[in-house]
Image: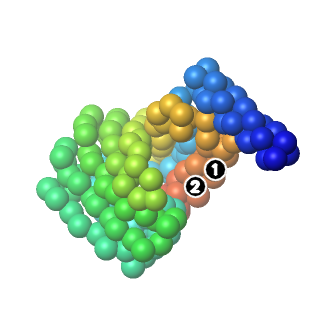
Amino acid sequence: MYILITVLVIIFGLIALLLLIGLFSKSGYEIHREIVINKGNKEVFDYIKHIKNQDLFSKWVMTDPGMKKTYTGNDGEVGFIYAWDSLMKEAGKGEQEIKNIIEGEILDLEVRFEKPFKAVAKTPFWCESLSENQTKVKWGMQSKMPYPMNVILLFMNMEKILGKDLDISLNNLKRILEKN
């Protein structure tokens, strides 16, 4: 009986410690990756602002090519919503919406995940013309996790996990656009 009580005290102590740490831990993350594409700004921006094109370059969208997709609104315009539903846990279920467009410069997207967990992330693209035939594309992801779920951020390196996927996606984008 003494051993059981000791084990329970240790377990509750660890849980209490994690909850206390969560009070003082960061509650979100923000990562960005960028790439230079040897195409003009207009061509690059016109391609990325059409969310359906992510089927061809986004590692996340390509996780399950057979997922169910629905669209609301006009692709490439504010208010367009691209929703997906997959049986694969890696792809999950959710939607992304074009929230704002500053033509040739910024495409503001909001991603709302439903499965495997509920979350909201901002995933903007920024384009900067470096020359007539070169454009720097920056893609990012920013999200917050409520207390006490933010404790997960202590154990997950979001920069490494999501950064790798952004790099793969941006390299796919570069390959596609420079091929045309």
Q: Residue at x 23, y 67 (%)?
A: 70
Q: Residue at x 41, y 59 (%)?
A: 115
Task: Report the Cα–Cα distance between label 2 and label 1.
Answer: 7 Å
Picture quadrant where residue 92 is located: bottom left
Q: Amino acid at mark 1?
A: Ile
Task: Look at mark 1 in the image and give the residue it sits on.
Answer: 161
Q: How many other residues sit within 10 Å of disc 1, few (<14), some (14-19) or many (≥20)?
A: few
Q: Amino acid at mark 2?
A: Asp
| Mark linked to residue 18 | none
In the foreground, 67 or 165? 67
Q: Residue at x 63, y 50 (%)?
A: 161
Q: Residue at x 25, y 37 (%)?
A: 100
Task: Look at mark 2 in the image and give the residue it sits on.
Answer: 165
Left or right of residue 27: residue 128: left
**Name of the residue lying farthest toward the bottom:** 66
Q: Are marks 2 and 1 in contact (CB under 8 Å)?
A: yes
Vertical side of 76 occupied by 86: above or below: below
Where residue 157 appears, x then y in whole percent? 67, 42
**Name of the residue lying farthest toward the right:** 3
